[in-house]
Amino acid sequence: MGSAAILSVDSLVELVYVSSAVRLFSDMEIVGILTEARRNNARAGLTGMLLYRDGNFLQVLEGPEAAVRATFQKIERDQRHRGIFLMKNSLIAERSFSEWQMAFRDISGDQVKQIEGYSPFMELSFTADDFRSKPDFAVRMLLQFKDKLR
């Protein structure tokens, strides 16, 4: 029996995944994705953050287990990206991104070098094997961006 069977409908979970866009998105397309995500997440009681860099996404979703699962299933069917890799899916005691239905940062180009704690590791693609093998690093990076948005 998988760990999902242990979770109840009321369980609060955090899910982190990476994926690659099938093509680079324009700023307007990203705004459209965010508008839809924020509307859907508000309705489902979800919060989180989305990072976008050079055609790659890193996203954290948090909320009731059933809502996170349903949203992730919809994300998996979305034809605008591929190579979805689930990095983390675990119970949490409280939300880390409770203020946002979906915070967003585009960390393309030299902007990434201005982030406190920058290291060349940040230059890896979100889908790189080294990045995938360190899901806790992904969560710490998302939390750092959260603090910068306040």
Image (cartoon, rainbow, N blue to C red):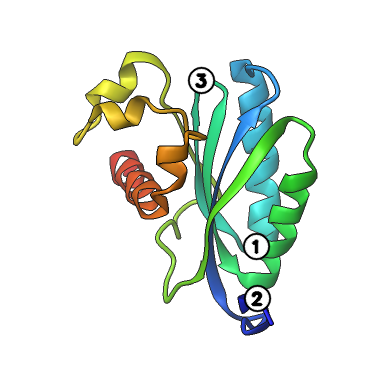
**Residue 144: quadrant of the picture:** top left
Q: Which residue is mark 2?
A: 4
Report helix, strand or loop for mark 1: helix
Is the residue 105 above or below the residue 60 in the image? above
Residue extending furthest toward the left: 117
Label at residue 68? 1
Which residue is pictured at 40% across the width and 39% down the height?
130
The answer for how far apart the CA atoms under marks 2 and 1 are is 12 Å
Asked whether the residues under the numbered discs 2 and 1 touch, taking CB atoms below 8 Å apart as contact, a structural biologist would say no
Is the residue 110 above or below the residue 107 in the image? above
Q: Amino acid at mark 3?
A: Asp
Label at residue 150? none
Which residue is pictured at 19% across the width and 36% down the height?
117
Q: Amino acid at mark 2?
A: Ala
Label located before the other in sequence (2 or 1):
2
Which residue is pictured at 70% across the width and 34% down the height?
82
Label at residue 54? 3
Total tally of numbered discs in the picture: 3
The quadrant the C terminus occupies is top left
Near-viewer residue (115 or 127): 127
Q: Is residue 73 left or right of residue 144?
A: right
Residue 149 in picture, x, y percent from top left: 34, 40
Report helix, strand or loop for mark 2: helix
Residue 136 in picture, x, y percent from top left: 37, 55
Q: Amino acid at mark 1?
A: Val
